[in-house]
Amino acid sequence: MSTQPVRIGARGSKLSLAQAGMMQRRIAAALGAPPEDAERVAPLIIITTTGDRVQDRRLLEIGGKGLFTKEIEEAMLEGRIDCAIHSLKDMPSVCPEGLTIAAIPDREDPRDAFLSFKADRLEDLPQGAILGTASLRRQAQSLHRRPDLDVQMLRGNVDTRLAKLQAGNADAILLAMSGLNRLGLGHLPQSLIDPIAVPPAPGQGALAIETRVGDTGLAWLDAVRHHGTTVAVAAERGALAALEGSCKTAIGAHARILGDRIHLIVEALSPDGIHRFRREGEALLAGDHEAAARELGLMLGAQVLEEGGDLLALHEI
């Protein structure tokens, strides 16, 4: 058993702690420790990020999705922690110099969940209903299907958003099903969004273990990697990279491994939902599976970008 503790950096939100706690137990097991020793061999270090502190504006207005990772990554580069557990969909397409995504565990449900007290599906909401979301992708995809909806900015952790729905601040909200499942709230949604018709965020449902580049060969990382998930999200994040994806671009991507092939759907929309550009394709998984998947994502993402061009840029709606 390793005698050197693996210090895990995580945000302080309930979901982040749930996700980090899951991985803490798995890392401890990989280090040869029983569950009761998890905190000793893999202690959690809580770090508050700018994305946690600023809750009254969209991420794109204050610097993008990297604000959920910046302070944690600084702690890792300074040697105060050894790894970080992130929701992969919150990570920019490129890590800071010296850091890398070293392992991706098996994926939870990648779909978006629809929650409402007024309808069972987005299509059933009354005319002009208020949809609460802080995601530009969810905004654009929802307006593409229901241009009459009144989309209102709704940020905060899962509990905060559920409380706002309960209080009537919105007629419906959309959340990641993976987060609800990890919080034991998987019974709450009225329905789930079809990921083929409406692709989720690239990497949604997957966790990322980020480390310093020099630590990627450590044995405990190999013990928590999941090959199928790693390959699928390589395709999705390839599309993200090609589309220069950030919080300022409404991008959805969904990959499925079917036998020895990977199938990928990529779409990007104008923020008002009027324009949608979509590509589907597949590739044979031979040789380096991850590289083949990423190449597929890069190709389809480039095709979407070429067609969509300036229409994909953020404008006020």
Image (cartoon, helix red, strand yellow):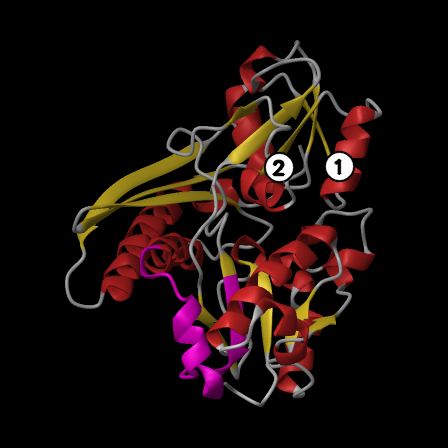
> Disc 1 or 2, which lies upstream in sequence?
1
* Residue stretch rendered in magenta on the structure: 208-228
Please tell me which residue lies in front, 58 or 233. 233
Look at the picture and state if 289 lies above or below 59.
below
Look at the picture and state if 50 lies above or below 144.
below
Secondary structure category for the residue under label 1: helix
Whether label 1 touches label 2, CB < 8 Å: yes
For the point 57% across and 25% down, which residue is it?
143
Estimate the x, y position of residue 285 in percent, counting from the top left. Answer: 18, 57
Is residue 189 something one can see in this rendering? Answer: yes
Estimate the x, y position of residue 188 in percent, counting from the top left. Answer: 64, 28
Please tell me which residue lies in front, 66 or 14. 14
Estimate the x, y position of residue 235 in percent, counting from the top left. Answer: 34, 55
Q: CA distance from mark 1 to mark 2?
A: 9 Å
Is residue 272 something one can see in this rendering? Answer: no
How many other residues sit within 10 Å of disc 1, few (<14), some (14-19) or many (≥20)?
A: many
Task: Judge left or right: residue 265 versus residue 62.
Answer: left
Quarter occupied by the C terminus: top right
What amino acid is found at the position of numbered circle 1 in the picture?
Arg
Please tell me which residue lies in front, 11 or 155. 11
Residue 219 lies in magenta, yes or no? yes
For the point 57% across and 90% down, which residue is it?
3
For the point 73% across and 52% down, which residue is it?
14
User: Disc 1 marks which residue?
Assistant: 161
To which quarter of the image does residue 63 belong? bottom right
User: Disc 2 marks which residue?
Assistant: 175
Look at the picture and state if 264 lies above or below 53.
above
Secondary structure category for the residue under label 2: strand
